[in-house]
């Protein structure tokens, strides 16, 4: 005689289409509220990453120009 574990029972229960649909409907307002609270921070993080990439690229270009102007010297 084999008994189903609690985990197997939960997975079987959650795999039903009507349960999935009901869970999505329940979670929709919660997810929407969370998104509305944090979307400005998501935009700020994206903006920061773009600015950071441009700063790193500018530093790289300045370094390359500096090293081209003084080819005979060794840098430590």
Image (tube, grey):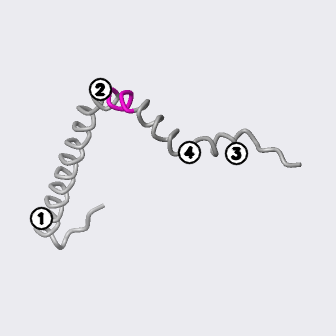
Q: Are marks 2 and 4 in contact (CB under 8 Å)?
A: no
Q: Are marks 4 and 3 in contact (CB under 8 Å)?
A: no
Give the image quarter of residue 42: top left
Mark 4 or mark 2, which is nearer the start of the sequence? 4
Which residue corresponds to mark 4?
16
Which of these two is toward me, 56 or 24?
Answer: 24
Mark 1 or mark 2, which is nearer the start of the sequence? 2
Find residue 49 and report its horizontal and vertical position in percent. Answer: 24, 46
Query: In the image, which residues are magenta?
Result: 28-33
Label 3 Cα crowd, 10 Å radius (few <14 / some 14-19 / many 20+)? few
Circle nearer the viewer, 2 or 1: 2
Mark 3 or mark 1, which is nearer the start of the sequence? 3
Circle nearer the viewer, 2 or 3: 3
Q: Is residue 60 left or right of residue 17?
A: left
Any magenta on residue 40? no
Q: Is residue 21 left or right of residue 72?
A: right
């Amino acid at each position: 005689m084999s008994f189903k574990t609690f985990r197997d029972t939960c997975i079987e229960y959650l795999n039903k289409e009507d349960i999935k649909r009901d869970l999505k409907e329940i979670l929709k307002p919660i997810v929407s509220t969370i998104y509305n609270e944090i979307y400005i921070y998501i935009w700020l993080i994206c903006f920061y990453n773009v600015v950071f990439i441009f700063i790193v690229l500018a530093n790289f270009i300045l370094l390359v120009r500096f090293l081209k102007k003084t080819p005979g010297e060794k840098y430590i």
